[in-house]
Image (cartoon, helix red, strand yellow):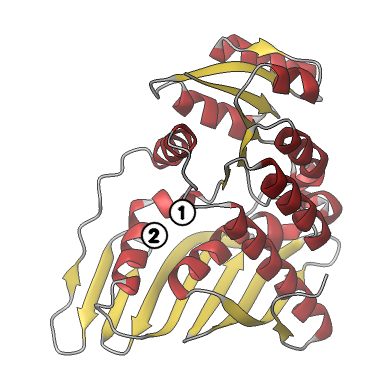
Amino acid sequence: MLRIGFIGAGGIAHAHAQRLQKIEGVRLTSAMDVDAEKAAKFADTTGAATADSVAEVLEKCDAVYICTPPFARLEQTVAAARAGKHLFLEKPICLTMAEARDIERAVKEAGVRCMVGYVLHYWPNFKAVHDVAVSGEIGDLQVCWCNRMGVGPRGGWIEDPSKSGGMTVEFNSHDIDWLRWVGGEVREVYGKTLTIPGDGIERHVWAIMTFTQGIGVLGSSWAAPISWSAFGAIGSKGMVFCGPDGKVRKRLREGEEMEVPLEDIGDSMLAEDRHFVESVLADKEPEIDLRAGVRALEISLAIQQSSKSGKPVALPLQD
């Protein structure tokens, strides 16, 4: 039996809890939130107990989901690691590289498992494009890209860059993680973000990432009245692509275009949570480990730095 506690009891915590309750061998123990009403609602819907502090949650669990806003995660994550608890961290893992290094040290010293919530790995169309791109079928990578447009959230902590890190860090780290999953390590970033006057947070993010081989392109908006999404990869032998219709297509240079069947993953978040549980119980490193979270944060911050300076930024960043 894996006992799981929650630090943070908002919407994303409820989403994970709903899935975890479907996984055999899991018991939700307790949850705390700075908003007592949220903790009480979580308890009512899950059967978990409410807790008044992080320490109280940690007393009763083997693993903990940290689902608080990113500005609050450092102390909670370090405390959980030092208490010997396995960790599921929602993204982004924190807001600065100094904080990320503190988390890395705590996790390494404690020897606990840590997974980061980059759920695009479990979305069938994102996974299908990745699998074709890295299989070698379309040859050596030349470029991969990810565009996601829509109207972003309004109000609350997410619109305060000092608490969310801005759109690049809070939202686009999903896309950045996916591009890195396809293209590998990023050596250099050139980025441009745009904050609409009077708005206070980035609403447009564009960036070019240089991999060891090929480039990655990110284009995203939180101010697009028409929602639109497309992502794909071009290699030396062909191309794989997913358009707004959600269908994945591929074509080799000497062949016909064909649709790629999608894996029947079902509920993507359930697959993500099941992987975390199985990794902990088997004492194996999860697929989306802490290093992935640190790298996504680093690239996000490099995009913002590049936008401010107008110059490319080399990676790794200097602390």
Q: Is residue 54 visible?
A: yes
Secondary element at image label 1? helix
Q: Residue at x 47, y 86 (%)?
A: 213
Q: Mark 2 points at which residue?
A: 126
Taking the image as shown, residue 109 lies to the left or right of residue 139, namely: right
Q: Where is residue 303 in the image (x, y as percent from the top left)?
A: 71, 74
Q: Which residue is drawn at 67% across and 29% down?
A: 10
Q: Are marks 1 and 2 in contact (CB under 8 Å)?
A: yes
Q: Position of residue 315 (x, y in %)?
A: 69, 79
- Tell me where residue 278 sits by quadrant: top left
Q: Position of residue 265 (x, y in %)?
A: 30, 44
Q: Can residue 38 be seen in this view?
A: no
Q: Name the residue under label 1.
A: 120
Q: Residue at x 51, y 61 (%)?
A: 226
The amino acid type found where label 1 is placed reads Leu
Secondary element at image label 2? helix
